[in-house]
Amino acid sequence: MTLGKYGVPSLILVNIDGCMDTAPPRYITDRYNRTFEVQFFVLRKKGEPIKHMVVCCNLGERWVLYDSNPGVPPNTDFCFDSPDFKNHYSVYLAAYVNITQPGHSA
């Protein structure tokens, strides 16, 4: 799904539906040579009795995990290469921002 002006999408939402246990690429380029950078992921925490979703946000070179569970400290640093990610989370949604659009500073 794309959001923004027709022909110049500002945001792309990619429905991965829990099929990845590794992070999608940080940058993607479309056939028009526009570059999109991932801004956040919606993750499912594996092993929870109900589907427990958490959000992982890109803060420049730092990734932060936001979890509504009171037992998890807020703004926890997150690493996609850690065994904890691969064993405990799967990616459901990725959001990419067009960094080549006019007015955007990378």
Image (cartoon, rainbow, N blue to C red):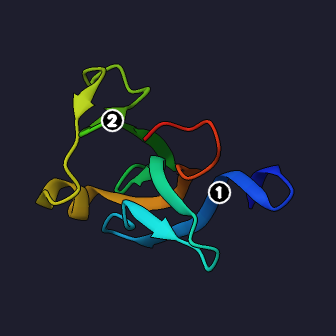
Instruction: Tell me where residue 32 appears, x and y as whole percent.
Output: 64, 74
- Residue at the far bottom: name it: 31
* Front-most of residues 36 and 88: 36
Relative horizontal placement of residue 63, taking residue 57 as reference (left or right): left
| Vertical position of residue 42 compared to residue 70: above or below | below
Residue at mark 2: 65
Relative horizontal placement of residue 90, taking residue 36 as reference (left or right): left
| Residue under the point 74% across and 61% down | 1
- Residue at the far left: name it: 83
Number of numbered tags placed on the structure image: 2
Residue at mark 1: 12
What amino acid is found at the position of numbered circle 2 in the picture? Answer: Leu
In the picture, the quarter occupied by the C terminus is top left
Give the spatial CA distance, label 1 vs label 2: 21 Å
* Front-most of residues 65 and 84: 65
Instruction: Tell me where residue 72 appears, x and y as whole percent.
Output: 27, 26
Labels 1 & 2 near each other (Cβ < 8 A): no
What amino acid is found at the position of numbered circle 1 in the picture? Answer: Ile
The residue carrying pointer 1 sits among few (fewer than 14), some (14 to 19) or many (20 or more) residues within 10 Å by Cα, namely some
Instruction: Tell me where residue 24 appears, x and y as whole percent.
Output: 39, 67
What kind of element bears circle 1?
strand
Residue depth check, mark 1 versus mark 2: number of the one nearer the observer: 1
| Vertical position of residue 13 compared to residue 32: above or below | above
Residue 12 is drawn in which quadrant?
bottom right
Relative horizontal placement of residue 80, taking residue 93 as reference (left or right): left
| Residue under the point 40% across and 38% down | 57
* Front-most of residues 28 and 43: 28
Instruction: Tell me where residue 44 appears, x and y as whole percent.
Output: 44, 53
Residue 43 shows which numbered tag? Answer: none
The residue carrying pointer 2 sits among few (fewer than 14), some (14 to 19) or many (20 or more) residues within 10 Å by Cα, namely many
